[in-house]
Image (cartoon, rainbow, N blue to C red):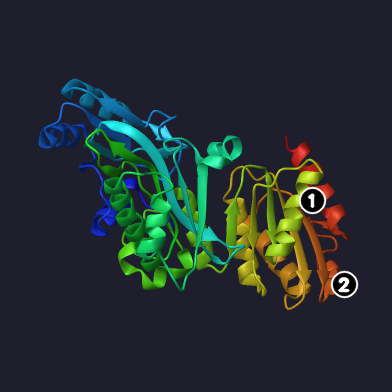
Amino acid sequence: MKIHEYQAKNLFSSYGIPVEKHILCHSIEDALAAYAALKMEKVMLKAQVLSGGRGKAGGVKLAKSITDVATCADNMLQMKINELPVNKILVSEAVNIESEFYLSFSIDRRNKSVIMMLSSEGGIDIEEVAKYTPENIYRVNIDPFVGMPDYLARRIAFFLFDDMELVSQLVEILQNLYLLFIEKDALLAEINPLVLTESGNLVAADAKLVFDDSALYRQEDICFFSEPTPQEEIELHAKAKGFNYIPMNGDIGCMVNGAGLAMATLDMIKENDGYPANFLDIGGSSNQKKILEAMKFLLQDNQVKVILVNIFGGITRCDDVANGLLKAYEELHSDVPVVVRLTGTNEEEARELLRNSDFLVAQTMLEAIKMAVNESIKAG
């Protein structure tokens, strides 16, 4: 689960990580009041949307007067960034920056540990640094049984600084950010940029936190921050019905059972010059009602021009799926073509049920995918 920058900064503050003064605003009037309350000539206005690339999209602006604040706030509150409307903005202190750094904790699955990344190249995409100047990134795997004791935090801090005052500041930030990361079941805790101000203080000028959805049951205070995007709401709705649903940008809706078959189906569609609109995993069982709900879900997507049903019957019975498809066809009255490939338990019975129906029945997975791609091309 992602949260907004202002929410992350509030968490940072509660863990003793320094952030600049900031006020959340929902209107131009709020922004003007925040500018007056901060009593500073220069302030930063930052769009609060759950998306990266805000700066490049014009969602981060420096304002030097009350007129600038009004203009910037007005523009931002009418913007969309990556299709997400900007409904709130953060007005914050504009700190005088001497230098910028990057700091994050995330999960290193290969080494089964937390990994800390620290770089002197802050303020830009860390992927660019990793690609062109990887020597500027320090990576340290954190032993979960050791954590971030003083000696380790000091050793890391000396990567960037010789000044003992700055080392002490960074040690405190490292330990507090690691503690937040562990206690709140985060998948990512990132400060980019971590700035050194002209007055010699380290401040988190931006904050990004992503939490493990599977651990939210024990993080009630984090759940309070949840503001799902429209896409996430669809995925949550699907999950409540027992489906795993991932929307994409193509035109072939995919009903499958099992993540492995789903991945193979998507790969083969792309290899045959098709474009998946989504994949919907119905899981290991499939009664008629579930198939009907799955069909409704796929047809909600206006991009879908053809539906590909690719089921491997193990526990799932192919004849159950076939009966569910026939029931769905009766109720939904859709003219979207449906290609069906059913193999495994009771596949012969399933094919017999679908004989003389309007479904396009394939014998093999490749045949079904080529049929679905052809139907999507015919539909334009």
Image quarter of the C terminus? top right
Choose between 239 and 51: the one closer to the eye. 51
Please report whichever mark, 1 or 2, sits nearer to the chain's N-terminal start.
1
- Residue underneath mark 2: 348
Above/below status of 129 relative to 296? above
The answer to which image quadrant residue 341 occupies is bottom right
Residue at (84% x, 71% y) in the render = 347
Image quarter of the N terminus? bottom left
Q: What type is the residue that disc 1 sits on?
A: Met
* Residue 255 seen in this snapshot: yes
The answer to which image quadrant residue 181 occupies is bottom left
Where residue 237 appears, as percent x and y from the top left, is 49, 61
Where residue 375 appears, as percent x and y from the top left, is 78, 43
Residue at (31% x, 26% y) in the render = 75
In terms of secondary structure, where does tag 2 sit? helix
Discs 1, 2 touching: Cβ within 8 Å: no
- Residue underneath mark 1: 268
Q: Which mark is residue 135?
A: none
